[in-house]
Image: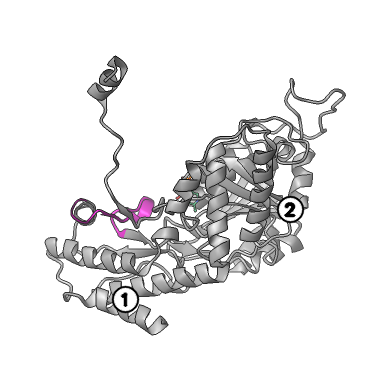
Amino acid sequence: MSRRAKIADEVTGDLNPPPRLLMGPGPVNADPQVLRAMSMPLLGQFDPAFTAYMNEVMALYRRVFQTRNHWALLVNGTARAGIEAVLASLIAPGDRVLVPRFGRFGHLLCEIALRCRAEVETIDTEWGTVFEPEQVEAAIRAFDPKLVALVHGDTSTTMAQPLDEIGAVCRRHGALLYVDATATIGGMDLPVDAWSLDAVSVGLQKCLSGPPGSAPVTFNDRVAEVVNARKHIEQGIAPAGEVPAAGPIIQSNYLDLAMLMDYWSEARLNHHTESTSMLYAARECARLLLNEGLENAFARHRRASRAMTTGLEAMGLGLFGDQRHKMANVTGVVIPEGVEGEAVRRCMLEDFGIEIGTSFGPLRGRIWRIGTMGYACRKQNVLMCLAALEASLRQQGFGASPGAGVDAALAVYRAAN
Ligand SMILES: Cc1ncc(COP(=O)(O)O)c(C=O)c1O
């Protein structure tokens, strides 16, 4: 063994993560085909073979987003990078932004908009509920925002905001609508054009069955026009004679959608080095989803949600939030009186190798969050999770009728066949 290897071995062993079934609010287990795609050889970023992959990624994500938008590209970074790219590129200092908040990620949108020096107005609804379109419209009337920023499925509360009417409301009042659909893409329907969503960003690590680290984004020409009105190409790569746009420069260089559009167009104007392996991952995630079929994937998530909720109730557990608006891929479970939530999670992880989620903010210590997403969203995982939860609860003195959860969930799957 070489001296160098010995030195490394003094501080680390082989990388050998323990096997886990990830049934929290994300990340979830990646599809092995995605991991395989990530191990493919690297290419130079202007290699025609690689730029062809970039074009394929655009074509694939137009389908994932159900849009005719030209712009469907990847922002390097986790889902938050996609959010920040859209908001930083759209919001100029002093712009009015409305953020309806129904969970933690609404607060995140608000925080990012404030960092972009927007004038931010918020409306809030109790965690576990969502907004009626009329509430959003009234706030738009009162505040006259340039942009409305909204989360689709907020994993912190497990609620999904219905969006089908809100796009039309925004159009009526001349506001742009941005949606963070990180937690729902691939698990719940999100027809970007039919719902008049102007810009949407997502991540790979939930229902797309990939690792965190790439943020697919789509936006329409209305958004591109606003962004390009602020386009200042970096000195050193700007073509001779390039005149910067009149609008205020976008504060972030890395997350500047105007420059990203140039990089993702035939101009291929150099910006960052595209994250090769993450692009392979994003491409495979989209391929797997589209080959399954969007409707089939949504139905798989709905079925797992029904099985999980039926099983949990059969165990005598309560579900959190307005169930009419529950996300199809995450379930909030009320921690029973007298049960120490973290001890149950520890038992599930250490004794069964299953991760479920804790919660934060006003729900800290009150609910667990169980994800049934992407590659992990399948019958055997739902059944194993319920069985492990039952046993872990018993360790804590909460006696569910043995087998009731698994039997009830199995009955849902049998009835669906
Ligand atoms: C709705 C929503 N938005 C944004 C994020 C942030 O994603 P990331 O941690 O990949 O930046 C998450 C992550 O859980 C999320 O659920």
Can the viewer see residue 30 in this picture? yes
Judge: label 1 CB < 8 Å from ligand 1: no
In reply to whether residue 356 is colored magenta, the answer given is: yes
Q: Is residue 141 magenta?
A: no
* Label 2 – label 1 distance at C-alpha: 42 Å
| Placement of 32 over or under 118, stated as above or below | below
Q: Is residue 300 left or right of residue 131?
A: left
In the picture shown, does residue 241 fall above or below 162? above
Callout 2 amino acid: Asn
**Residue 205 in the image, given as x and y percentages of width and height:** 46, 50
**Is tag 2's residue or tag 1's residue first in the polypeptide sequence?**
2
What is the x, y in percent for residue 202? 56, 51
Q: Residue at x 41, y 50 (%)?
A: 27
Residue at disc 2, CB closer than 8 Å to ligand 1: no
Q: Amino acid at mark 1?
A: Ala
Q: Nearer the viewer, residue 147 or 308?
A: 308
User: In the image, which residues are magenta?
Assistant: 350-367
Instruction: Check the image and name the residue furthest to the right.
Output: 241
Q: Is residue 67 above or below residue 309?
A: above
Q: Residue at x 57, y 55 (%)?
A: 286
The residue that mark 2 highlights is 220
> Percent from the top left, x then y, of residue 143?
67, 54
Residue 409 marker: 1
Camera-nearest residue between 94 and 407 = 407
Residue located 77% across and 51% down the image: 222
Q: Secondary structure at mark 2?
A: loop
Describe residue 82's horizontal placement relative to residue 376 as left or right. right
